Image (cartoon, rainbow, N blue to C red):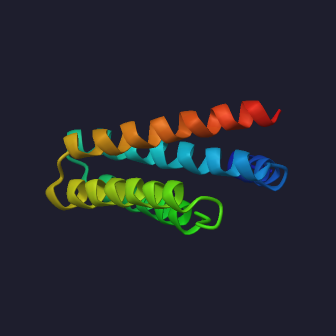
């Protein structure tokens, strides 16, 4: 069994055994990781890698947005959707303009949200 197969197996086990909150945290971490890779790629003028990673982050954010449940709290849900839309627009513009500075605000927003989810996870334990 090669490294990639072991890594995929490990990730599959992590996802299958994760709580819903842990899954959300994993999505945030994945989006932030992709944004950081994209930022570095833009700075190295690797436009293909930048595009790939920005699209990946946007897909993760779209998944997070689609999982928002407005029945829990309409105001919080709408605020969260607005933050996701803001991040998505920043990443779209960063990809279009190949401007790494636009990624920073999305990273900061997603990091703040990630921290909130981590606090919620700790309270649940």
Residue 12 in the image: x percent, y percent?
77, 55
Left or right for 116, reference 8: left
Left or right for 19, reference 32: right
In the image, residue 4 above or below residue 48: above
Tell me the residue at 55%/65% (across/down).
63
**Residue 57 shows in the view:** no
**Residue 11 shows in the view:** yes
Residue 54 in the image: x percent, y percent?
36, 56
- Quadrant location of residue 66? bottom right
Residue 47 in the image: x percent, y percent?
24, 55
Tell me the residue at 80%/49% (across/down).
19
Left or right for 78, reference 20: left
Nearer to us in this view, 92 or 38:
92
Tell me the residue at 24%/58% (across/down).
95
Nearer to us in this view, 111 or 120:
120
In the image, residue 110 above or below residue 66: above
**Quadrant in the picture for the C terminus:** top right
Q: How many marks?
A: 0
Nearer to us in this view, 2 or 91:
91
In this view, which residue lies farthest toward the left?
97
Left or right for 77, reference 11: left
In the image, residue 74 above or below residue 13: below
Residue 18 in the image: x percent, y percent?
80, 48
């Amino acid at each position: 069994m090669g490294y990639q197969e072991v890594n995929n197996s490990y990730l599959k086990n992590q996802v299958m055994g994760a709580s819903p909150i842990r899954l959300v945290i994993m999505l945030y971490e994945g989006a932030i990781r992709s944004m950081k890779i994209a930022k570095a790629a833009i700075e190295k003028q690797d436009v293909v890698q930048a595009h790939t990673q920005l699209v990946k982050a946007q897909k993760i954010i779209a998944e997070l947005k689609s999982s928002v449940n407005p029945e829990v709290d309409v105001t919080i849900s709408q605020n969260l959707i607005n933050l996701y839309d803001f991040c998505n627009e920043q990443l779209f513009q960063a990809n279009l303009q190949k401007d790494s500075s636009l990624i920073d605000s999305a990273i900061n927003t997603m990091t703040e949200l990630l921290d909130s989810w981590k606090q919620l996870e700790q309270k649940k334990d």
